[in-house]
Image: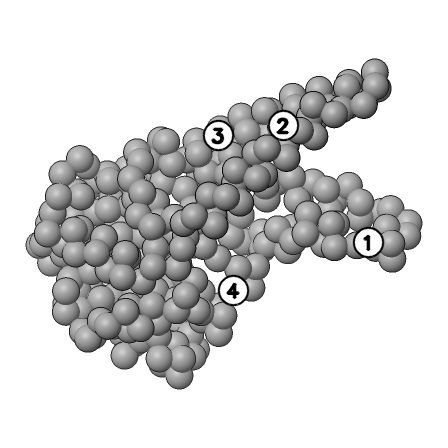
Amino acid sequence: METVVIAGVGLIGGSFGLALKRAGFRGRIVGVSSPQTIEKALRRGAIDEGASLEEAAPRADLVYLAGPIRTILDTLPKLGGLARGGALVTDAGSTKRRICEAGSRLRGALFLGGHPMAGKEKRGVEEADADLFRGRPYLLTPARPEALSAPGAREFVRWLERIGAEPRVMTPQEHDRTVALSSHLPQMVSTALSSALAGGSGVAEAAGPGLLDMTRLALSGWDIWQDILETNRDEIVRAIGLFEERLRSLKADLENGLPEEDFRRGAEFARRLRAGRTGS
């Protein structure tokens, strides 16, 4: 792999460039973004040069699409006439069914869906971090079964391992169902909690670290979440329904006594979750 093109050199794209360089990548990293972002990315050392997609894609061994979901969906059809045969195209989008469907229509270049389970509330290449992916799952969703066995895909997976990520393979459908529970539902709960408390007199003044932790995700931007909600609406609705059912059960237990069993079950899962992080 000699030339990597990162389309969308923000937090994720910039972090990928920094991580590759720290892991020993000696090829050329080309950024495709606005002139202002390219300038910042060059100063950070996340890329070696900036170019348009039309200039960069034909040179690429790997095209890494790190923009918002809507931008990824708009860019994929263009790559069919730009990316060279044998190149690998991948993405970092938060939902996968729509993206992988579009990627499966690529001709010449091979598409492999991806989603790094890493990020921050703050965005932009200024926040890029070479260690962003370290110890984090990196979900891979092949649009076609043969995608993972291609030489370019195997090399990409090796680089993911070198930057400290933990590659895991699942279908696009499994991905969207799983992240609706593990990522999208926590966002919706945090948003709903913040919205519910927004008019509460004196709540902010009496808030401790627990409320700060619970409302952290509510800081996430609507411009990012609009695309996620549009492309994974059905699975997120199901996830909210599951949470509603458990919340109603917790309320009924509290009305009739004390919800000790709910606390035990919740604490057991929280311990397992943290044990898995520690062991990763």
Specify the amino acid type for callout 4. Answer: Arg
Query: Which mark is first along the chain, 2 or 4?
Result: 4
Choose the circle earlier in sequence order: 3 or 4.
4
Specify the farthest residue to the right. 201
- Horizontal arrangement in the rendering, residue 238 relative to residue 154 (left or right): right
Q: Residues within 10 Å of mark 1 (few under 14, many from 20)?
A: few
**Nearer the camera: disc 2 or disc 3:** 2
Q: Is residue 88 above or below residue 11?
A: above
Tell me if residue 87 can be seen: yes
Disc 2 target residue = 265
Q: Tell me if mark 3 has few (under 14), some (14-19) or many (20+) residues whose alpha carbon lies within 10 angstroms of its own.
A: many
Instruction: Say which label, 2 or 1, has the lower sequence index.
Output: 1
Residue at image mark 4: 123
Residue 135 higher or lower than 142, as above or below: below
Give me the C-alpha separation between circle 1 and circle 3: 32 Å
Specify which label sits upstream in the sequence, 2 or 3.
Answer: 3
x 16%, y 56%: residue:
155
Query: How busy is the neighbourhood of tag 2: few (under 14 within 10 Å), some, or many (20 plus)?
Result: few
Residue at the disc numbered 1: 207
Q: Position of residue 80 (x, y in %)?
A: 18, 51
Q: CA distance from mark 2 to mark 1?
A: 26 Å
The quadrant of the rendering that contains the N terminus is bottom left
In this rendering, the label closer to the viewer, 4 or 2: 2
Q: Nearer the viewer, residue 56 or 93?
A: 93
Q: Secondary structure at mark 3?
A: helix
Image coords of residue 198 (percent x, y): 80, 48
How far from the left and from the top, in percent, is residue 279? 43, 48
Task: Give the x, y percent position of residue 41.
Answer: 39, 76
Residue under the point 41% across and 42% down: 95
Q: Residue 235 shows which numbered tag?
A: 3
Relative to 143, 118 lies left or right: right
- Kindly state the secondary structure of the residue where label 1 is placed: loop
